[in-house]
Every structure is written in structure tokens, then in C-alpha cells.
Image: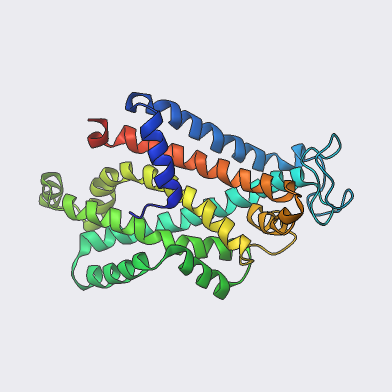
């Protein structure tokens, strides 16, 4: 599995600061960070002080009692856009991970168990996709599909599908010759029953680790696509889009339109990364030793 920059950095921080016996703590921290942002996304209409797409103040007002995080270049409340932007980040990440998980796991199960030409063709296709730079592939697909929540999620999902495929296929190849699988065949179990009742339960334990780490990468990929103008259409609240819009004002020392969206991207990515690395430390017996 590819190591993203975020995963590499967080992994080294964890290993250097936290002892292995304390992995439960940063799993808890990661879970709390992710949960808070999910709750913020769910209850956004109730906690956002203003409409995120309407002008509610003067252009580029500094943070104050009226606008806690200031206003952007169009006079919109930055705090409200951050709160509603959590909906965009959570929804696109959830869709992207769900699509890649569904297709990657299913194809990995079928390819590893079936073998033959079916396995060869899908392995070559997935290896080709896996070897291609993920962000570049997402940019190409996003440009082809156009803006929109579903299109962006699909563009991101494609780059993570090979990760699940390769992981599941490798596990299936090692499990399908096991004694319990041979015993299932001996009693006349059908191939579908063997795959989903006997092999799949032994594969699923590794999925949460990969899922949480891919979710962290998906947040960064979404932000990158939005920053490049290939994400969601304006005026949809989106952290990456707001980061791009606020970037133009940094030279004038107007820091708040870009700083707070960027901070939210870091927090959500950190939450998923802590969760994934912690689960990896807990569930991986070699790391425990």
C-alpha cells in the first residue's frame, strides 16, 4: 500500500512520541476528532450563525465578536462556510471510500478465488492504476467527469480501489488453500458460500485500517482537487475551494480566509490518520511484538 505524505508524517510522530502501549489513546483522539467533525456536518444548519453562501458583512472583515473567524472576499462568514464545508468533506470522503471499498473488496475476492485469465486481467488493470500517481489520476478523472459531489467522489474512489483489491486478493490467495476451505469444499459447499462465508470473514479484519488511512488521503485529495478548481461548483462551501480563494490575500496579510479552512483540512486528516495508525498498531500482531 502506498504511503502518503500525511501518513508518513503522522506515523513517525506517533512512533517517536507515543509508546506502543499507549496506542489506545491516539485511537481515541483520532476517533474524537473525526466524530466532532461528523457531528458538526450533521448539525451544520443549527450551529452555523449565518447562511454560508450569502453576503452577511463587509468584504474581508477581521475576526471579531460579530464574525468570529472574519469574512471572506465576498463578505461571507468564514465560520459558517467552515461548518457547512464539513458536510462536503465528510460526504465526499464517505462516498469515495464506500465506492472504492465495495468494488475493491468484491473484485479482490472474486479475482483471488477464481484465478486464471480473470485474475490475470484484473491484476494487470489494477497494477496499472496503482502505479499511476494518484493525484494526477484524480485530476484527469475529475476534469473528465466534471464538477459535482458524486463525480468528485468517483474520481477519488478510482485511485483507492486498487489498494483494497491488492490487499484482499493477496489474503484470498493465501486462504483459499487452507484446511477449513478444503473442508468446506469436501462437504459440498458452493463457491459463493466458500467466498462469502468462510474466506471473507477472515479478510475483513484488515479493512478498517486501510479504510481509515484512505479516508485521510481522500480528504487531502478532495482539498487538492478543489484548490485546483476541479472539485465542487461555487458557491458550495468547500474547504479546498475557500483555501484557494483566500490564498490570493495572503500577500496583503489577510490570513483568516485561508488559514481556518486549511486548519480544518489538517484536523480531519490528522483524525483519520491517528485512527488508522492506532488500529494498525493494535490489530497488527507483528507491530504489537
In the rendered image, the quadrant that contains the C terminus is top left
Question: Which quarter of the figure has residue 230?
Answer: bottom right
* Residue 10 x %, y %: 43, 41
Image: 261 above or below 108: above
Q: Nearer the viewer, residue 38 or 131?
A: 131
Name the image quarter holding residue 209: top left
Residue 3 relative to residue 189: left or right:
right
Which residue is rendered at x = 61% and y = 39% of the image? 37
Q: Quadrant of the N terminus?
A: bottom left
Residue 103 visible in this rendered orientation of the protein = no
| Residue 116 in picture, x, y percent from top left | 18, 70
Nearest the viewer among 204 and 144 is 144
Which residue is depicted at the point 10% across and 50% down?
A: 186
Q: Is residue 223 above or below residue 230?
A: above
Residue at x 24%, y 67% (from the top left corner): 119
Q: What percent of the width, then of the height, locates residue 93?
A: 54, 52
Position of residue 122 in the picture relative to residue 263 (left or right):
left
Color style of the picture? rainbow
Picture quarter containing residue 233?
Answer: bottom right
Position of residue 254 measured from the top left corner of the image (x, y, whole percent): 76, 50
Question: From the viewer's perspective, is residue 166 above or below residue 147?
Answer: above
Q: How many marks?
A: 0
Amino acid at each position: 500500500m502506498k504511503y502518503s505524505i500525511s501518513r508518513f508524517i503522522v506515523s513517525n510522530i506517533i512512533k517517536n512520541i507515543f509508546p506502543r502501549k499507549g496506542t489506545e489513546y491516539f485511537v481515541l483522539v483520532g476517533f474524537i476528532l473525526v466524530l466532532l467533525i461528523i457531528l458538526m456536518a450533521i448539525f451544520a444548519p443549527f450551529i452555523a450563525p449565518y447562511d454560508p453562501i450569502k453576503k452577511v458583512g463587509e468584504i474581508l472583515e477581521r475576526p471579531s465578536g460579530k464574525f468570529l473567524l472574519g469574512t471572506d472576499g465576498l463578505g461571507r462568514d468564514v465560520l459558517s462556510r467552515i461548518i457547512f464545508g464539513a458536510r462536503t468533506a465528510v460526504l465526499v470522503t464517505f462516498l469515495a471510500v464506500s465506492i472504492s471499498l465495495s468494488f475493491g473488496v468484491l473484485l479482490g475476492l472474486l479475482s483471488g478465488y477464481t484465478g486464471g485469465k480473470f485474475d490475470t486481467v484484473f491484476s494487470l488493470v489494477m497494477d496499472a492504476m496503482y502505479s499511476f500517481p494518484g493525484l494526477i489520476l484524480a485530476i484527469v478523472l475529475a476534469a473528465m467527469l466534471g464538477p459535482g459531489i458524486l463525480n468528485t467522489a468517483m474520481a477519488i474512489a478510482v485511485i483507492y480501489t486498487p489498494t483494497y483489491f491488492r490487499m484482499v486478493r493477496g489474503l484470498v490467495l493465501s486462504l483459499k488453500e487452507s484446511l477449513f476451505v478444503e473442508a468446506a469444499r469436501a462437504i459440498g459447499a458452493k463457491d459463493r458460500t466458500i467466498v462469502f462465508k468462510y474466506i471473507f470473514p477472515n479478510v475483513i479484519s484488515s479493512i478498517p485500517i486501510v479504510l481509515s488511512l484512505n479516508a485521510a488521503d481522500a480528504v487531502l485529495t478532495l482539498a487538492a482537487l478543489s484548490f485546483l478548481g476541479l472539485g465542487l461548483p461555487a458557491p458550495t462551501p468547500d474547504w479546498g475551494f475557500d483555501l484557494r480563494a483566500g490564498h490570493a490575500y495572503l500577500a496583503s496579510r489577510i490570513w483568516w480566509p485561508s488559514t481556518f479552512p486549511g486548519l480544518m483540512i489538517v484536523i480531519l486528516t490528522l483524525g483519520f490518520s491517528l485512527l488508522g495508525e492506532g488500529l494498525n498498531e493494535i490489530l497488527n500482531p507483528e507491530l504489537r511484538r
